[in-house]
Image (cartoon, grey):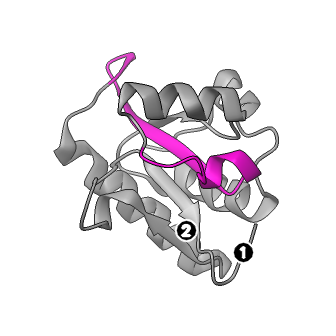
């Protein structure tokens, strides 16, 4: 089945780096699990709130510069947080990144504070 980004997800790409948008748009065309964009570019106030809540550990988030997005599986008309659903989503994103020549990192691959929804452009190739 072929999916497409909804209007809300498209709005959440505003301010996100064009290369990362290209990866997300390609991934939605090839994914086995539909997904929604939860968050793209953030304000510093929003980032402080997330740190305070324990949902983030840094005030240097790539979201602040539009170099990161958070995606979540969309199943049966709602967002799902089951870890197994993030793996096919990550696979689609990584495949789309290879196809488009864009270097990304998935938060689910991090050793500490694994973050399944998080995808960001690599610092080395996309400094802030």
As drawn, 59 above or below 108 = above
Residue with the most extreme top position: 77
The location of residue 16, given as percent across then percent down, is 75, 49
Please check the rendered image and state whether residue 65 is part of the magenta-colored stretch, yes or no.
yes
Please check the rendered image and state whether residue 106 is part of the magenta-colored stretch, yes or no.
no
Which disc is residue 97 wearing?
none
As drawn, 4 above or below 97 = above
The reply to whether residue 6 is in sight is no
Query: Which element type, helix, strand or loop, lies under badge 1?
Result: loop
- Which residue: 33% across, 49% down? 116
Residue 21: quarter of image: bottom right
Per the model, the C-alpha gap separating discs 1 and 2 is: 17 Å
Mark 2 highlights which residue?
A: 96
Q: Closest to the observer: 62 or 83?
A: 62
The location of residue 85, given as percent across then percent down, is 25, 43
- Whether residues under marks 1 and 2 lie with C-beta atoms below 8 angstroms apart, the answer is no
Magenta residues, start to end: 57-79
Query: Which element type, helix, strand or loop, lies under badge 2?
Result: helix
Residue 67: quarter of image: bottom right
- Counting other residues with Cα less than 10 Å from the Cα at mark 1, is it few (<14), some (14-19), or many (20 or more)? some
Q: Closest to the observer: 9 or 60?
A: 60
As drawn, 13 above or below 27 = above
Q: Closest to the observer: 35 or 3?
A: 35
The reply to whether residue 8 is in sight is yes
- Which residue: 40% across, 44% down? 117
The location of residue 80, given as percent across then percent down, is 29, 27
Observer-side mark, 1 or 2, equals 1
Image position of 96 (left or right of 67): left
Q: Closest to the observer: 51 or 81?
A: 51
- Counting other residues with Cα less than 10 Å from the Cα at mark 2, is it few (<14), some (14-19), or many (20 or more)? many
The location of residue 127, given as percent across then percent down, is 73, 74
Mark 1 highlights which residue?
A: 126
């Amino acid at each position: 089945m072929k999916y497409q980004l909804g209007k809300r997800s498209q709005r959440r790409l505003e301010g996100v780096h064009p290369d990362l948008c290209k990866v997300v748009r390609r991934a939605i065309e090839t994914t086995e699990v539909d997904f929604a964009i939860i968050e793209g570019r953030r304000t510093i106030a929003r980032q402080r709130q997330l740190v305070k809540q324990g949902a983030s550990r840094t005030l240097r988030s790539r979201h602040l510069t539009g170099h990161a997005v958070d995606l979540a599986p969309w199943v049966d008309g709602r967002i799902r947080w089951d870890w197994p659903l993030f793996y096919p989503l990550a696979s689609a994103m990584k495949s789309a990144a290879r196809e488009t020549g864009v270097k990304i990192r998935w938060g689910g691959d991090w050793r500490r504070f694994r973050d399944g929804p998080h995808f960001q452009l690599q610092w080395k190739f996309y400094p802030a």
